[in-house]
Image: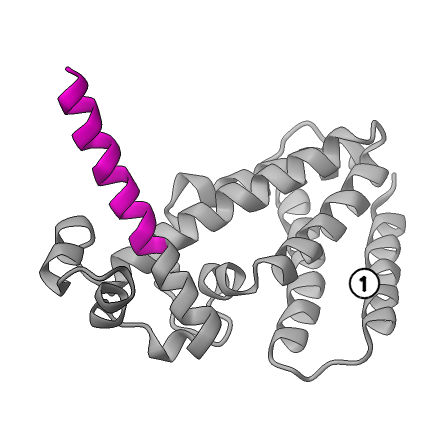
Amino acid sequence: MASKDRILRLKEETRTNILDAALQIVKSDGWQALSMRKIADVIEYTAPIIYEYFSNKDAILLELTRQGYLLLSKDLREAKSKHEMPAEQLEAMWIAYWNFAFANKELYQVMFGVSTTCSCEMANKLPEAELPWELFTTAIGELMQIDDLDSDIICTKYYTFWSVVHGLISINILGRSSSDDINRQVLKDAITGIIRSIRP
């Protein structure tokens, strides 16, 4: 039994090493430099071994996307838990979203196809991709006093928030930005303005 556990642990370590190597390459040389062969070189394995864990590069990108959503959701939950009022929760969560994007720039890029190719259809089908949506729409529903979280109005308000915040993040990731102080003020003004507009 101990031997079986050890084999499983070694497989999980190798899988983690592959994903870590992929991020290391991207941080150093950009998404266009990522290949199965380069990953194999970094972890000092042969390329066929990488294929035992991931069928192709898209499978690696999808797993990084899944991990990105898990990390983002964790940050959002922590931000939300610090406040009781839905307006304050929304502001804290969108700021946490912003902070996540720049603390994990490469993951954010692959999650949303910013300056990289993204299997967006496959990524959107990940159960983990629903987690941020659920956290945000719950707070929006509470703020607007709407119980049906699938209502068109909640969906519209979520995408209003997301379009502004994601747009500002994308502008900054692509290097067409103003100073950090100005960006944070624009972010805060936008979030506060949307919250004010949707209060009942």
Query: Mark 1 highlights which residue?
Result: 187
Taking the view exactly as shown, the residue that stands out farthest to the bottom is: 176
Quarter in which the N terminus is drawn: top left
What are the residue bounds of the magenta stretch? 1-19
Identify the residue at horizontal 25%, vertical 32% (top origin): 9
Residue located 81% across and 34% down the image: 86
Q: Position of residue 11 (x, y in %)?
A: 21, 39
Q: Is residue 68 left or right of residue 81?
A: left
Coordinates of residue 66 in the picture (x, y in percent): 41, 47
| Residue farthest to the left, as pictured | 48
Question: Which class describes the residues within 10 Å of circle 1: few (<14), some (14-19), or many (20+)?
Answer: many
Which residue is situated farthest in the top direction here? 1
Q: Position of residue 188 (x, y in %)?
A: 86, 58
Would you say 11 lies left or right of 16 here?
A: left
Q: Nearer the viewer, residue 157 or 4?
A: 4
Q: Is residue 170 left or right of residue 95?
A: left
As helix, strand or loop, the secondary structure at mark 1 comes to: helix
